[in-house]
Amino acid sequence: MEEHLNDELNEESGKTTSEEQTNATENITEDINFKNRIDLSELKDGIALIKNEVEKVIVGQKEMIDMLIASILANGHSLIEGVPGVAKTISAKLLAKSLDIGFSRIQFTPDLMPSDILGTSVFNMKTSEFDFKEGPIFSNMILIDEINRAPAKTQAALFEVMEERQITIDGNKFKMELPFIVLATQNPVEQEGTYRLPEAQLDRFLFKIDIDYPNLNEEIEILTREQNLKGGIKTDQVTAHLSKAQINTFQNLVEQILVESHLLKYIADIIVNTRNNPFLYLGASPRASIAILKASKAFAAMSGRDFVTPEDIKRAAIPVLQHRVIVTPEREMEGINTKQIIKQIIEAVEIPR
């Protein structure tokens, strides 16, 4: 009887202690201020508006849309790769239309020259001087369709403008108006009449975004929307929301997102592991580590946080690295691709706590 009583007393005491701990935790939680140090409410609302506009036309492909928005927030360029007909081009056009910014589309062809993109000097008969005529690259968002269709000479013309947001013609520098974002598409299966992008060109893209086929339900939804369109124009449904000034403000906010020192080391560990991995012929450069840093900040801001977590870094790693590293010929013959190796590296690197 005494033992039974002691058990009941101990049980009751345990309940009391547990209740006290719960109440104490609740009180502590109430005292902690979880508000962000950076006000991201306008940014979150703006992103929601953009997504809503794009999803009026695009079915599924949520990860691609997130990546494209993140690239804008991180002030980076994106290479979109997918088989023909999976909405690569129209997604970029819709994204541009949802923003109140300049848009220019350039169709790359084998006979395209650098001057067709950048512009050229034209002799003015009235002034007897050469005037510079701007090319289609002078805009805020540039869609380069089938970027691998143009030869190396034309591709190389993009090096300076993508990295430094300026071009140099006849010794004169011309600055691009900000924001300046390049979205390029390429087809991974049709290689006839294409020119492989050099590593220096690939390294200037923040993301390489792979687009897969839609699933069955998404395919049905695509057909249903097409049937209901009844000859209308898809892009007419999209309305512009964010101005150039707002986008520049959002990009500045993303730069202020907090990244702890142990997370900086986490990024560095992932990058260094790509250089030491026996399956990789070419590892990632410091530009890749900076790209992961910027992309993870963008993902944090899109989630409404003013600080980066390891999950943000892991989410950014594959789209940032997969086009920057090269698999050894032996492993490539075995069917191993860069995405698989990067996943193994991320799993092998200890996550900071």
Image (spheres, rainbow, N blue to C red):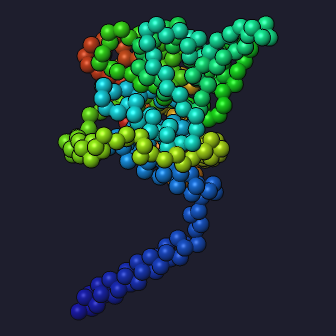
Who's the residue at 58% across and 72% down the image?
A: 31
Where residue 226 sits, quadrant-wise, is top left
**Residue 91: quarter of image:** top left
Q: Position of residue 271 (x, y in %)?
A: 49, 28
- Quarter containing the N terminus: bottom left
Eyeballing the image, is 91 above or below 30? Answer: above
- Taking the image as shown, residue 29 lies to the left or right of residue 346, namely right
Residue sitting nearer the eye, 153 or 326 = 153
In front of the other: 167 or 255: 167
Among all residues in the image, which is located at the extreme bottom?
Answer: 1
Q: Quadrant of residue 13?
A: bottom left
User: Taking 5 as reference, is 317 above or below it?
Assistant: above
Name the residue located 57 percent from the left edge and 47 percent from the top edge. Answer: 242
Q: Is residue 120 visible?
A: yes
Q: Position of residue 192 (x, y in %)?
A: 32, 9
Badge count: 0
Q: Position of residue 105 (x, y in %)?
A: 49, 26
**Residue at 26% over, 19% down:** 335
Left or right: 250 with respect to 316?
A: right
Q: Residue at x 45, y 19 (%)?
A: 107
Image coordinates for residue 179, horizontal then vertical, percent: 62, 35
Toward the right, the furthest residue is 127
